Image (tube, grey):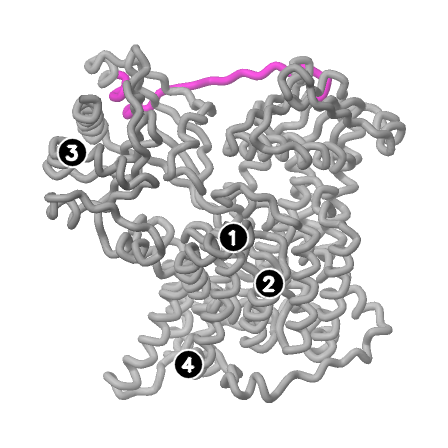
Amino acid sequence: MSPKRNKLNVFLKALPKNIFAGFVVSLIALPLGLGLAMASEAPPISGVIAAVIGGIIVSIFGGSNVTITGPGNGLVDVLLVAVTTLGLESAYAAIICSGIFLAVLGFLRLGKLADFFPSSAIQGMLAAIGLIILGKQFHIMLAHKIKRADTIDYLIEIPYTINDAIHYDKTGLIYAAAAGVLSLIIMVLYPKIRNKYLQLIPAPMWIVIFSIGFSYYFEFIAHQANPISSVYMISGIPEFKAIIAQLPTVNFSKAGTFPFWSSVLALTLIASIESLLSIKAVDKLDPEKRRSNVNLDLKALGLATIGSGFLGGLNVVTVIARSSVNVNNNATNRSSNFFHATFLVIFIVLFSTQLTRIPLPALMAILVYTGYKLASPSTIKRIFSIGKEQAIIFLVTLIITLKIGLISGILSGVIVTFLIHIIINKSASLFFRNVLKPNVLMYQEQDNGNYYVSIKHFCSFLNFYRLKEKLDAVPENRDVIIDFSLCEFVDHTVMENLNNYRDLFIKRDGNFDVIGLDLHNSDSKHPFALRRLLPVPGIIKSGRTKRQKTLEEIAKNFNLIYESKNEKNTHFLNKFYFFRIKVVNHIYNKLTAKNGSISIFDIEFSEGELIAKETIKTTMLFMTLEKTIPKFTLDREGFLEKLYGFASHKDIPIKEHSDFNKRFYLLGDNATAVKSLFNTEITHFFESNPYYHVESNGECLLVFNKERLASTKEVKALLDYGKRLKEVISK
């Protein structure tokens, strides 16, 4: 079979999964598109237009694999300024020009642009964007529209808005504020519900469903008008025919003014940074660990933005939250982005009139939660834990972005970072003397084929692109040694990126070692802290909780070895199907048999990236086997599993065990071998015991129950189950 035909077969085989993923993503994209557009004071439909145009064009011409495109969170404030200062028609012109610039960046192969911004400065900018969104939309969420000079004033007004909302005496405002508060509660609590059926419908779509249902209740059951004030209901959503027939007028008359080009520059800068960061994050989530062609994606995003602007849409960027949902629903290629756009068109064609039943505060609650996620206390705490200097960079970028603007904020972050690096090293010559010099040497060792990379002078955000170019040229399944012995200074941005590379190489069965930092030290014990030749001692204190003490007692009773410390060496989990799109942070509270054949541990892993990142803690059992068995995954049969069956995840039936086939969902690449393993004794074992997720990677077993930490009683039950399961399978 020719490679071209083989690719077509693979594409068609994965089509049901990508259609399903596109459908789920569209459920999030619809309310977010409406909300982001309204927060920008653009017509509500403009956000949906951006998602549709982006989904179609980028899926055809883009260079990424499982990303989703549409209107972005980071552009809300810039678009708001453009619309209010230029007017809507001229704002469309600015959007078109920013699309042209974005495409030019792609043609000039400037996809490495994001590498020149320090990580803490980018985090400060994102946090500022989050506060801008939260500050401005919080008041609308509580049905209290106000106008203030800048974002800090909006934030200061929040307590007064809450007080006013508590004392509302108008029914319309009370109901509007209640819709906003309830929607925010849904956004906050919904991710904590680990139910696979509820998770099929994202939280924003539940808000849409409840809002429309609320409107119909009063219309058909209570026979009353919607009690929510009409001022706080969505308006101005045209029917599909009107969108096609009434294209907006684009006005380039202000192209000679400073505000116009200031908006174009800001839109281009934020769109490129947000897209490049999102593409990089989604590449880490891709189960196949493919690398995106960022320059090709920038061209496609630019083309999509131009088309969106002419059709009355917003800028098109790569979005992390919707992309994470796409990956989590087993998308495999860009077609899921296309189908997400297709479903949005279907929604608008069939249900555009229903969207006017959604209260504006409900949509703003979605954006308030999004803003909080961008500027969450955990993000700020993490920055502070990396080092005091990173906290300064973060805060300077944050404050200047809030007070002056996004471009000034990110530039100030770059300048402050450079000045801090000079102060820390007590030398400016280290940077000025060497910044233009080639400082990275890489060659492949002849005896073992390993790639050796040596870095000298310094390695920071200013010249990291050189190291990145070398590392990108190395296949991820090979061994790489990074030597900093000749390097005097390594900054936080480099350390964080090296950690990302390490994760990538490990996922692909490669090896990534960093050496030569033994003489370097930092003010923080955080692995991302900057390193320099100034040793600073650190003290680590530890204590044990009541649960840890109980686990220690269990270890003694079961003749196991107990270790409470965090363990980063989790490579043994990489080959399990469950962790194909998850990132393991560490394991801890580990109970291990003396021969190492069985261990049970608490584990922390994450799903998604950036604002879509969710951290999950659970308890798992790991066992090594004395013989090789087929790879398989066993779970409880349910409605979701039947849907997966439609999406090419075929359940393997076991003959003469109809009860097992009804109750369990069995997957495996080699169906014949799996059927051979599941004899009567093993099948009866699973039928007569509680449900557990059981997975084999061929040499080991992974067992767990719920996606939460197990109680000490459940730990004992899991240990007992695992020992008995191992005995049955080893026969």
Is residue 547 highlighted in magenta?
yes
Residue placed most toward the observer, 165 or 320: 320
Label 1 belongs to which residue? 7
Q: CA distance from mark 1 to mark 4?
A: 35 Å
Tell me the SS state at disc 4. Answer: helix
Q: Mark 3 against mark 2, which lies toward the viewer?
A: 3
For the record, the magenta segment spans: 532-552
Q: Earlier in the sequence, mark 1 or mark 4?
A: 1
Q: Which mark is residue 60?
A: 2
Q: CA distance from mark 4 to mark 2?
A: 25 Å
Label 3 belongs to which residue? 679
Q: CA distance from mark 3 to mark 2?
A: 48 Å
Q: Which kind of residue does numbered mark 2 sit on?
A: Ile
Q: Position of residue 13 (x, y in %)?
A: 42, 55
Tell me the SS state at disc 3. Answer: loop
Q: Earlier in the sequence, mark 4 or mark 3?
A: 4
Q: Which kind of residue does numbered mark 1 sit on?
A: Lys
- Tell me if residue 707 can be seen: no
Q: Position of residue 657 (x, y in %)?
A: 11, 44
Q: Earlier in the sequence, mark 4 or mark 2?
A: 2
Q: Residue at x 60, y 49 (%)?
A: 279
Q: CA distance from mark 2 to mark 1?
A: 16 Å
Q: Which kind of residue does numbered mark 4 sit on?
A: Leu
Q: Earlier in the sequence, mark 3 or mark 1?
A: 1
